[in-house]
Amino acid sequence: MGRKKKNPPKTEDLPDVVAQHLASGRYRSTYHSRLRQNERSISLQEIRYVLLNGRREPARDEFREEYQAWCYGIRGATRDGDKILRIIISFSGENMLIVTAVQLER
């Protein structure tokens, strides 16, 4: 019987890594995320603000076998406080990927 392959380690110091990617421009929204941002009226500026000022939701961490990568959830209010968002991110090579954005109920 084969052993189950062990998942790679999670990203350490996630807030610092996220801030570095945003500051250096090494991030992009996936096609799925751009669709969801458009239909949910969520701007990239709102996403950036939540990524920099929100809090990680460890319960949302998920290893995606098909991509061989961890996804992380970050939740927070927009700058104006009008929306509470959950942003799902992942990393691919040197880039941070914005996987999706969801507006949560207050």
Image (spheres, helix red, strand yellow):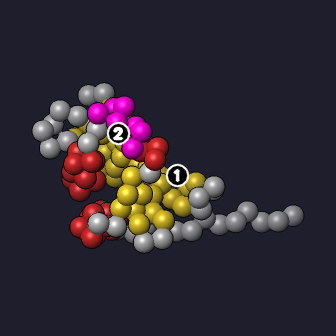
Residue at left offset 25%, top offset 52%: 48
Q: Is residue 35 magenta?
A: yes
Would residue 85 be visible to someone looking at this image?
yes
* Residue that mark 1 sits on: 62
Q: Is residue 8 magenta?
A: no
| Helix, strand or loop under label 1 | strand
Q: Percent position (x, y) of residue 91?
A: 45, 63
Q: In the picture, residue 38 is in which quadrant?
A: top left
- Please rate how many residues cluster around mark 2, counting C-alpha atoms within 10 Å: few if below 14, some from 14 to 19, many from 20: some
75 above or below 69?
A: above
| Helix, strand or loop under label 2 | helix
Residue at left offset 23%, top offset 56%: 52
Image position of 5 (left or right of 67): right
Residue at left offset 36%, top offset 31%: 39
Which stretch appears magenta?
34-41
* First reached walking from the N terminus: tag 2 or tag 1: 2
Q: Percent position (x, y) of residue 17?
A: 33, 68
Which residue occupies the extreme left position in the image? 80
- Label at residue 37: 2
